[in-house]
Amino acid sequence: MKTWKTKASLVAVLCAAALGAQASGHSDAPNIGPRSADGHQMSPQSRGVFANPKPTLETRGVQTLHDYIITEKEMWDFLFENHPIFKTYIPEGRIVGKPHISDRGEEYLHTGNSEQYTADSDDGSHRTKAVQYRLGAKSILDFPNKFIGPEACGECHAVQYEKWSRSRHAKVVRFPDEMEEVGGDLKKPAHGGKNGLLPEGITADAIYAVIGTPRTKYGFLDSYLVRGSYTVRGGLLKDGTGTVHAGSNQFSMNWTTFLTPEKAREIAEVIPTFPTKMEEFGNSGSNTWGVNSYGAKQDKEFLFQPASSYCEVCHTFKFDYQTKEDFFADLGNPEALREHTISKGISCEECHGAGAHLDGGVGGGMPSNCERCHQRFNYVSDMAEGPNAKPEDGFNVKMKGSCPSCGTEGSQMFNSAHYEKGMRCTTCHDPHEVTEGSYLTSVTKTNLKKECEDCHATQLEFFKTNAPHGENSCSSCHMPNMGSCEKFTAIQFPDQAGFDNVRASHIWNIKVDPIAKTLNPPEGKPRTSDVKGWTVAKDEDNHAYLDLMWTCARTSSQDITVLNGKGCHSQFQSELDEGLHFEDQKEIYGEVMEWQGPVQELHAKVINQIARIDELMNITRLSISEKASVMMMVDKARQNVALIEKDGSWGVHGPAMAKRLMNEAWIFVQDAQQTMDNAGYDKS
């Protein structure tokens, strides 16, 4: 009898596992745990935990990381025996590409270089540690749970519910009949392209839900709650016919609506290596324009990954099953799973806990917060080295290819001055209303409870004088779209600030430099997106920074500033005069220095002159009234200097205003100096 049909003793499982080798996370991991008929096993990380478990559920009544990994064992027992990939397609040889088993052990103890951090931070306990993800208080494999659903919360919290219900947080998991942008028809050509939202061979009756919105992409969870990283050609998944192919699985908004064959050829005239033919998109491409391979390498490899391992961390949903036997009895039946769904989307209880503050609930505070999904790290040990380095300095941004990953807003912010001063996600964002307007738009405009100018009033005073830039917002330059949701490496060209960038950066700090780049591969490696190990650079203050290409000349089909600003200075989108299409960073630097240079030069002269006046005041022959006049002139100059310094942009926020202030300051100190010179000085 299989374990998912029994109430196996956790103690028995752990005792058997303890006979294996110690957890290593490498190829020498113990040969224990669930196994498919063709020999596929759970990850080395999970098997290592099975061999050397450190659970707390049975001893302390609290589920921690090892418990979470052990809990998934029965899910894998079931999938290896029942999922069509292992039950039908592999045994019959109807599969192109190999499944890569990705479970909780791999996702928590391997991704983000967790193993390196575990080794670097080991205090002798040899306890494994996760870098990239946070645990939800409850998962879909915890039975029973006390979730009551967002509608029940909305009975008393109407305002919060209304804000949430129209946001993307509420729409990250949708059932087929809820796909209003295509009228519930998932095979209908969508968003002006020729493809439906589901890939070839995948039909609505073979999936549990669609993952995605018009902002970025559409994927699916199949009827076994396994991530849709594959497609079926020459048949249908629901019938077990045709051939499974790795990849070609995800509808891409960017590829469909912006990167048409014509646009790709236009870009290739400037960037010769930009792909223009299907075969040039490589591992991240597919067999049809507009559908890419995500979580897969086309026809080579695909992640076999249940939602319990990855998706449910952020694209959350919960069931009302009371026992695991009931759950496994319905697994594979999408209609039954949907009927038993009590909550989906990033709903109330995902943050406030099951039942929240209600009598019998387990929440009431914030058992989970934004960082669960929006602070994905990569640990880079080299960044934690040096005389003044701290271990946390090694926590850089999770990357997808050469671009920051989705869900890294918090990890980008972690390396900022804003974070050091105490700013967090909810400082600016209302988590109930993360989407202003309709979630059906292809761009994101968030509703903010605090704007930049609430803290940066001086900068705003300069910026509003700056036509035409002053018509934009601070985020137009300080928060460019830089993040990738698709890991579409074939179109990632970070040195040209494009093109797989759909998520706003949260770095803010702009570095004015002709060559310094925000995104960099390991030292000595080529600057191509297929290189592993790209990181977000830091400046001399240990803060991440934006380079001038991303700030001024990025190309993005889903950056609201670029779209509303006539393409800004992108050489591929700009509608401005050709002379304002910036092709490289040095060109932008030259433009910026035309603003900053005169202001900085005058600033230095005024500072030196004030210092000279202060020194000469000790020997001047000024009368009382003349001294008062000199002091007033110097004070006015100091005020202008203080404004320039507080603004900090040296003329970029408001070139004309900055020049005027420094010219006035120079006149003030010259006038003061002339008055003193006319009065004469005592000999020292």
Image (spheres, helix red, strand yellow):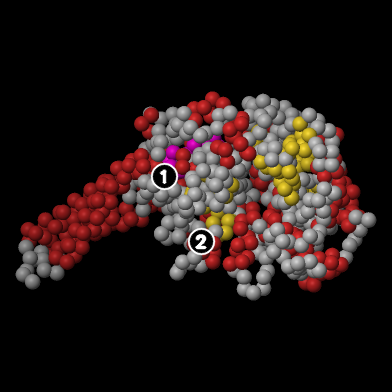
Residue at left offset 36%, top offset 42% = 586
Which of the two residues, 546 or 525, is positioned nearer the viewer here?
Answer: 525
Q: Is residue 369 magenta?
A: no
Expressed as whole percent of the image width and height from the top left, the position of residue 436 reads: 59, 42
- Residue range of the region highlighted in magenta in the rendering: 549-560
Tell me residue 194's x, y (percent): 67, 25
Q: Quadrant of the N terminus?
A: bottom right
Q: Is residue 206 left or right of residue 169?
A: right
Q: Amino acid at mark 2?
A: Asp
Q: Callout 2: 10 Å neighbours few (<14), some, many (20+)?
A: few
Would residue 27 appear left or right of 276 to someone viewing this image? right
Name the residue at 66% across, 29% down: 288
Residue 282, picture quadrant: top right
Task: From the viewer's side, name the closer residue of 596 and 283.
Answer: 283
Q: Quadrant of residue 162?
A: top right
Q: Nearer the viewer, mark 1 or mark 2?
A: 2
Using the image as rendered, state which of residue 39 and residue 480 is in the foreground: 39
Does the rendering let one see residue 157?
Answer: no
**Residue 548: numbered disc:** 1
Q: Amino acid at mark 1?
A: Leu
> Which label sits on residue 382?
2
